[in-house]
Image (cartoon, helix red, strand yellow):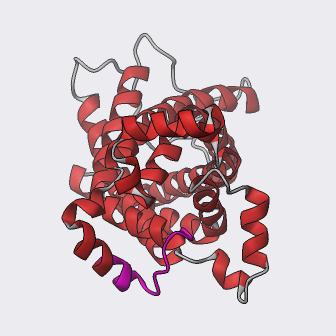
Amino acid sequence: MSDVSQRKKASSAGLGSGATSAFLLQPADLLKTRVQQSRASTLTRAFREILNGPTPVRSLWRGVTPSVLRTGFGSALYFGMLNQMRQYATRMPAIPVIAGEVQPSKSNTSSLPKLGNVANLTTGALARVAAGFIVNPITVLKVRYESTHYAYKSMAGAAKDIAAKEGLRGFFAGFGATAVRDAPYAGLYVLVYEQAKARLASVAIPGEPEKPKTMSSSAPVNFASGVIAAVTATTITNPFDAIKTRLQIAPSKYGNMVKAAKMMLQQEGTKSMFSGLSMRIGRKALSSAFTWTVYEELVRRAERVLV
């Protein structure tokens, strides 16, 4: 299969799985934004305010359109670039590949090119940062639309207001913190995901002879590996996510990533760095595991059709 067809296949699979998970888990994402927007917000208080509103169900899905666009197209870009980078990495002897490191499981639960730890970490980080930069304007619109600090009536109104008051720069507010969060998150995720799959597959089917895996046998391993990877990477990178949210909601107040971190620590303590962690873990564990499981299965099915 050519590199072009592989990239298209990866992008299409990423778009479908990313958009689906974003729609289903939008309430968790909205609650995370409400909790992170200020120290006065708590999960219980934010949830109660929504339930006491005139349209609680609709309010829980506020901002779902930019969420689906951001996650859908972001996932398409991410998986397309990740697949391409991994393909290139397998052809570069300077990149440490599987030899000398953790060996892939004979269960073959993955449809991705096999790489070593350093290559998994690097390709995951680079692909995520590149995709994050492209969709950052949508992310800013999503966060502000979800926040109670703004009274936007529509996405078009939000875009016009940002452009009028902050110019083009406003659409990239918080990108520094986003990049610092996404690079280690994505790199760690791919690294832990591949390691977990190799170990879980060998535990799940010890001593089995090598044979092609079906969706029913590989999906549970991929999903469990996705949950493990998401919980690990999410916990480590949550401080950057908390800072990013503050910068995107109130860029004039917090200025830059360093200033925001100092203000949050001085005024609210270390706890502010981990605000919204429980919601982020719940959302990320489910969305990442679902997205990667569906992505791998769609890619595997497409490969069978094209073979």
Seen at 45% across and 63% down, the residue is 71
Which residue extends farthest front?
267
Q: Is residue 240 above or below residue 196?
A: below
Which of these two is toward me, 243 or 190? 243
Which of these two is toward me, 92 or 151? 151
Q: Which residues are magenta?
A: 147-159
Residue 307 seen in the current view: no
- Residue 198: x percent and y percent? 59, 28
- Residue 184: x percent and y percent? 43, 33
- Residue 106: x percent and y percent? 58, 29
**Location of the C terminus (image quadrant):** bottom left
Seen at 51% across and 63% down, the residue is 17
Residue 165 sits inside the magenta stretch: no
Q: Count of labels shown? A: 0
Determine which quarter of the picture holds residue 211.
top right
Determine which quarter of the picture holds residue 55.
bottom right
Seen at 35% across and 26% down, the residue is 119
Seen at 54% across and 56% down, the residue is 291
Residue 149 sits inside the magenta stretch: yes
Residue 116 seen in the current view: yes
Question: Could you tell me what secondary structure mostly forms the magenta stretch?
Answer: loop
Which of these two is toward me, 66 or 47? 47
